[in-house]
Image: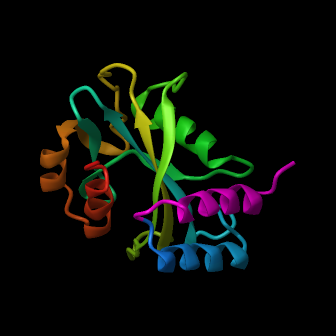
Amino acid sequence: MVSPYQKIKSVIDKASQLPHVDKKTVEVFLRRLHEGKLIRDENPEDHFCVFFVPFYKETRQIFLGHHKKANDWIPPGGHIEQNETLIEAVKREAKEELGFEITNEKIELFNINSLDVSHPSRPCKIHHHVWYILFMNKFENFNHTQKEFYDAKWFSLKEALKRIRIPVYRKTIQKLLF
């Protein structure tokens, strides 16, 4: 069985090869990885999470939700569970947050970053995000969860960038302008 450490290390190694991922971010991720206790159940304050950006190439649109906790328009995603790979976390979150079962859609790593998410009412302080693009085979009208999102919809990349206020998220989405 592959350990959570090995699973995340392999993804960080892949991310380090991406031209737009800076070396300092890779160093932060590797340092954090070596500290252990990588998921929220093990370390409620400082852990790894996944985001996935549903992308419909034909119209160059992405799907965002107006997230209740973040109070911003962000892609779906969430915390990694015990013994779960990052891709398994993406698939589970797609089902939970969008009511969508990923079958043969391509899931591609495209970024990593960290964010201070401190809030007095929540235990999370630092999220180390692993970002994926979910290439949609067809346009989907997702059934987003009201528990997580006030609203959710498809946006052009230009419109999405206008909506996203959190700088690290906006900067990540800008990398989709390929």
Single out the residue that lies furthest toward the top. 138
Residue at point 47%, 35% (across, down) = 94
Extent of the magenta region: 1-20
| Magenta stretch: includes residue 12 | yes
The colour scheme applied to this rendered structure is: rainbow
Residue 140 visible to an observer of this rendering: yes
Q: Which of 39 and 148 is in front in this view?
A: 39
Left or right, residue 12 beside residue 100: right
Does residue 114 sit above or below 8 in this rendering? below
Left or right, residue 10 beside residue 67: right
Residue at point 37%, 35% (across, down) = 145
Residue 125 visible to an observer of this rendering: no
**Residue 30 % position (x, y):** 63, 75
| Magenta stretch: includes residue 19 | yes
Residue at point 45%, 66% (across, down) = 21
Q: Main secondary structure of the magenta part?
A: helix
Residue at point 62%, 40% (across, down) = 88
Does residue 62 sit above or below 7 in this rendering? above
**Residue 51 % position (x, y):** 45, 50
